[in-house]
Image: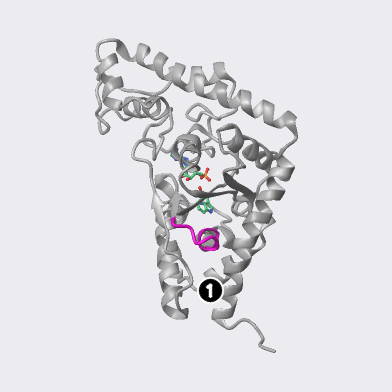
Amino acid sequence: MKRMLSGIKPTGQLTLGNYIGALRNFVKYQDEYEMYVFIANLHCITEYQDPEDLSRNLTDAVALYMACGLDPNKSTIFLQTDVPAHAELGYIMACNTYLGELNRMTQFKDKTANGEKNMTAGLYTYPCLMAADILLYNADYVPVGEDQKQHVELTRDLAQRFNNKYGDTFVVPEPLIAKVGGRVMSLSDPHKKMSKSEETNKGCIYLLDDIKAARKKIMGAVTDSVGIIQLDKENQPGLYNLIEIASSLSERSMEDIAEEFKDQGYGKLKGYVADVVCAELEKIQNRYNEIIVSHQLEAVMKDGAEKASVIANKTLDDVKKKIGLEIKY
Ligand code: AMP
Ligand code: TRP
């Protein structure tokens, strides 16, 4: 069975973008692949987080993983810091990464271009840790949203470089990006990614949003003045995004949805999208509430950490030996 691994960095509440671009796909894949999904808590602290908020977001993220359908009997779910090998291989990877490679990472470049101050060294070397996350498990595939593709590509380069230098060690992973829903856009600005770091909350739907509030955000989504329902991503990006959201949640094609609402106006279409999204949110939230009261998280995380450690420690030992980090007695 091929192995798959992915992680989410819960620096805030999980969003509909996380669900459509990533989480939902993990659930689909868990039957076909040996699946490892982790909560990337070390990645969260590359920028300051209020400790209480961070801790609550981590708990919510695990519960939401399961509420979205990740089954701990099928997938290994764990917390990054429960497997210390991540930090250790992250450092080793950083020693095998060139500054030029990190300077080219678009997430870093965007932040620099936006004049962001007080950027940390951790933020800069983040892609090295992400490479370690993936390579420790010798994952064949990494299902991620479009924005993470570049990081997985760097991981491939680092794996190949290491293999060339020290002999065959790592599986070279491939990114897997969903054809529909790989990049869910903000409802208030369809040129921007739907993101939990958005300043106003209007453009972003959170998985734990109040259902009425979520409906209101969709009904108020920015569209255009063209007045015709059709699939024109360039000129009607807001409308396109709404149809894409509904399509990815309903298993209906975008063409089919556009055709049905062709003569019905934007309000009707938005109402339909809101129905689809709210039904999905309700399902997730009901399960989330059941999971929180069932107190099963601790056992799931302990079990996940144990399973993950076995594989991660084996890879790390091999790496250390190959590099010559061990004393031979
Ligand atoms: P993050 O929340 O940045 O840790 O992202 C976790 C996963 O969700 C990654 O695979 C991202 O690519 C994916 N993701 C985040 N936001 C979106 C979005 N707006 N559309 C699609 N995928 C997303
Ligand atoms: N960098 C990813 C994000 O921001 C999260 C992440 C960390 C990840 N390590 C990973 C995703 C390993 C896939 C594989 O979304």
Q: Nearer the viewer, residue 29 or 181?
A: 29
Give the magenta part as a residue range: 132-140
Quick one: quadrant of the C terminus?
bottom right
Q: Residue 238: x and y, percent?
A: 35, 27
Image point 56% across, 74% down: which residue?
319
Image point 44% across, 39% down: which residue?
21
Q: Residue 281: x and y, percent?
A: 54, 24
The residue at the far bottom in this view is 329
Q: Badge 1 is on which residue? A: 95
Instruction: For mark 1, give the secondary structure.
Output: loop
Question: Three-letter amino acid code at disc 1?
Answer: Cys
Q: Is residue 136 magenta?
A: yes
Q: Nearer the viewer, residue 266 or 65?
A: 65
Picture layout, residue 25 above or below residue 45: above
Any part of residue 86 in sight: no
Any part of residue 107 in sight: yes
Q: Residue 298: x and y, percent?
A: 74, 43
Q: Nearer the viewer, residue 153 or 296?
A: 296
Q: Residue 195: x and y, percent?
A: 49, 38
| Residue 289 as seen in the image, left or right of residue 113 | right
Q: Is residue 168 magenta?
A: no
| Residue 191 as seen in the image, left or right of residue 119 | left
Q: Nearer the viewer, residue 113 or 300?
A: 300
Image point 45% across, 45% down: which residue?
32
Picture layout, residue 251 above or below residue 173: above
| Residue 201 as seen in the image, left or right of residue 256 | right
Picture layout, residue 213 above or below residue 161: above
Number of numbered labels in the structure image: 1
